[in-house]
Amino acid sequence: MARERAGPLEYSRKVWVRAWLVATFVFLYAPIVILIAFSFNDSRRNIVWRGFTLEYYDKAWQNASLIEAFANSIVIALLATAISTVIGALLALALWRFRFPGKPAVEGAMALPIVIPEICMGVALLAFFVRTGWPTALPWPLNLGPIVIGHVAFCFPFVAIVVRARMAGFDRALEEASKDLGAGEWQTFRRITLPYMKPGLIAGALLAMTLSLDDFIITFFTSGPETLTFPVKVYSMVRFGATPEVNAASTALIVVTIVLTVIAMRLQRPTQTAEAGA
Amino acid sequence: MSAPAIVQIEGVTKRFAGVVAVDDVSLEIRPNEFFALLGPSGCGKTTLLRILAGFERASAGRVLIDDEDMARVPPNRRPVNMVFQSYAVFPHMSVAENVAYGLRVTGAPRPEIGPRVKDALAMVRLSGLEERAPDQLSGGQRQRVALARALIKRPKVLLLDEPLSALDRKLREEMQLELVRLQQEVGITFVIVTHDQEEALSMADRIGVMDQGRLLQVAAPQELYETPSCRMVADFIGKMNLFAGRVIDARADVLRIESELGELRFERAGLGAQESGSAEIGVAVRPEKIRLSYAPPSDGLIGVQGRVAQLAYLGDASLVYVDTSAGRRITCRLPNQHRGAGMPAAVGEICWVAWEPADCLLLTE
């Protein structure tokens, strides 16, 4: 019996489509898999596989300046994410809800930090902090201030865009219904608007977090001589040869990111909690 | 005087950037009344409803609800509740949470909320669906949630914005009966906005017809249908044959009109007081009041000869379109009373259409 021809949507039955799919995944994930695998490699040069070891995890853990850079990165990312989520969400709300003169200009200006080449923004921020005489020799964590400010400056437009897209599908009658039923402005925002925004907020925050966590250029320009972040530290380590220690530290960062993402995805499912209460 | 009005609208005008949406409307709505605002889309009826709810501020005039001026009262403090056209059921809350919302946000005592939610859901026949999420409900059920959510607040007036327009025909008829039953059960004033005249006629105690921001006529359904005050209302409610005419002789007992149908003669007694010199006048007659015959009609009837131009079979009735020699088309609606009777006429036949002068309306506006 002749096999039925595959329909346009039965892509898994077409061999070349499947091959393409596999190639895409290999292209995307092979480098990461290799990075993780070689973090367990028992070889200083880390070019050929010499056997399994956890030694370099221990080494990375003992490397005080690497840990410090890691902690700096996490603190910066958390602060920058929190601040840019709030600013971005407020901007998105303002653009969604109000009509005001110069609105197109504001929308354009909002996207500017996304389009401006990062190197320009780095130089601009450096010039700004030098020009304003921003104090440099501050104790931790105040010395992270300029980096956080720099990160917020390029992260919040991403949050604003994501949240704005989410709000585009919001039925304004929901807010009116809430007020009609006796809720004030604030109650309406907290009980109706905010829950609707939540997936957008989480997606925006995640985006901001990953952008901040692995940013190199802007951080490089805004960090003082004493403040290292993880990407900058890894860069300096790689210049003296890539040991499995770098791989180990990178793997740890990947794990942290995945855990955060999973938590965020969990938070994004509101209907399940409603059903659990039944 | 009759019972005081629950809603008084006094000279309300609303302009949006120069466009007049509501034009000097004055209206009184009585307690426990089922009131319909009827009009074509864009006539300002929804804007008027939103002014009552407090979502729009009137440019001029004032609104009193239960004798209280609403000018400075925000929507959340008005003794009215609204059922939105889109229902606006909160998507992230269960049915019970939706219904309880209005009590929760105003800080009603907790032990009171549960039983009241139960009662409200029983009233709209949704018992058992408390824990459903809105996206698991049908359109009709979602509307019932919106109704229960509004009624649980025990408003003085319930506002309904095109509540049935999103439902299919069968469900719509069911909900019409349901809304009337609910209104009688709870004894709350209902103000419904609709563009569907059948809906308004079948449900409302009184109807206000609006067009281009103005309120044209306020009357009970039967009065509105049988004695519309102007051409617009006559044309909008039901079907109407309208002919242009001119008064040529206005005596104490007889009115003679020169019209597209020829010269017509009316006894004053059957017409009410319509004083007009040689003014333009509209002669109107409803299709179902017209009879069809193949012989000249008897004296005293208004009759016109014509040719059957087209037929339309509706099931319970048939429409016969007759072209007069003057080129006017007259629609008559003939009931199909017996099985196997066939069509009442055939295209091309020469016939007479006739009606009682008393079934005629003379419209000056």
Image: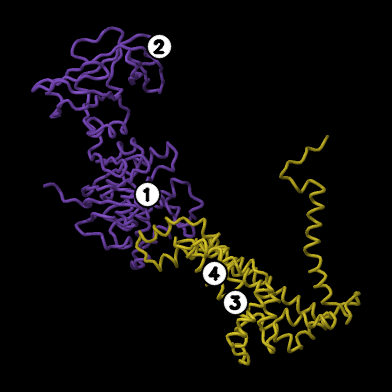
- Percent position of residue B10, x then y: 21, 51
- Percent position of residue A77, x then y: 63, 77
Q: Quadrant of the C terminus of chain B?
A: top left
The hue used for chain B is purple
Amino acid bearing label 1:
Val
Task: State whether discs 2 and 3 lie on one chain.
Answer: no
Amino acid bearing label 3:
Ala
Task: State whether discs 3 and 4 lie on one chain.
Answer: yes
- Subunit of label 2: B
Amino acid bearing label 2:
Ala
Within 10 Å of disc 3 (Cα), the crowding (few <14, some 14-19, many 20+) is: many
Q: Which residue is mark 2?
A: B346
- Percent position of residue A109, x then y: 56, 66
Q: Which one is earlier in the sequence, the residue at label 1 or at label 2?
A: 1
Q: Nearer the viewer, residue B111 or B250?
A: B250
Helix, strand or loop for disc 2: loop
Per the model, the C-alpha gap separating discs 1 and 2 is 50 Å
Q: What is the quadrant of residue B175 in the picture?
A: top left
The hue used for chain A is yellow
Per the model, the C-alpha gap separating discs 4 and 1 is 42 Å
